[in-house]
Image (cartoon, rainbow, N blue to C red):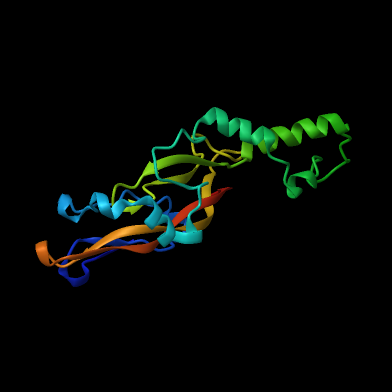
Amino acid sequence: LGLLRPGGGQPFLRLRPSPSDNLPVKDIVEHPDPEYDPKEHDLDERTLRKKLGSHFDPGFMAVAVPGPANASGAEAAAGRARAALPAELRRLDLGPPQGPRLRVGKKARRKVLQWLWAYTYCPVLYTWKDLGVRFWPRYIKEGNCFAEKSCSLPEGMFCKPVKSVTKTFLRWHCQGWSSQKYCTWIPVQYPLISECKCSC
């Protein structure tokens, strides 16, 4: 995020895609003067939907206060149980690196692999974030990596972002001062965590 003062007007945070290790986006510091807020006639939903067009993604953005997202630890555990075992775990040899090969029954092998996957799985947990009146839509479903405990054996590694996607929002932007200022909605890119992985 870069802080700009185009035309000497409202401090304006230009949102652009960021490296995954800088996500989620920190809370944006806004100019406190309500003169830089959009007025009621600037918030016509039909007009703004038309302006945003195909970028409107109801899965990740909401105009009104949305319901809860899936940010709890219990839901993370449930996600682990539902997620399919990755190929690298299915190919894992459970025997010792040297010495006689260990015979493990199919049922026992499946249970061990499921336990390993439950321990190392790194889900993306989503919560709704209020971006404030100067963004439209105002609410974004933001991802975070589950980091309540280590995800490795032995411990030491944690779930961290490895991939991100960008969503286009409208940002209310003013140039100039007081009665001389000109304000309009401009499109901005907002990066979101889309995948987490167990890493150092």
Decide if residue 101 is in sight here. Answer: yes
Report the number of numbered marks. Answer: 0
Q: Position of residue 184 (x, y in %)?
A: 27, 63
User: Image point 51% across, 60% down: which residue?
Assistant: 54
Decide if residue 153 is in sight here. Answer: no
User: Image point 58% across, 39% down: which residue?
Assistant: 151
111 to 84, vertically: above or below: above
107 to 158, vertically: above or below: above
Q: Residue furthest top?
A: 74
**Does residue 56 appear left or right of residue 119 in this picture?**
left
Q: Position of residue 58 (x, y in %)?
A: 50, 47
User: Image point 60% across, 38% down: which residue?
Assistant: 154
Q: Position of residue 142 (x, y in %)?
A: 45, 46
User: Image point 81% across, 44% down: which residue?
Assistant: 93
Instruction: Give whichever of 68, 66 is nearer the camera.
Output: 66
Residue 3 location, quadrant: bottom left
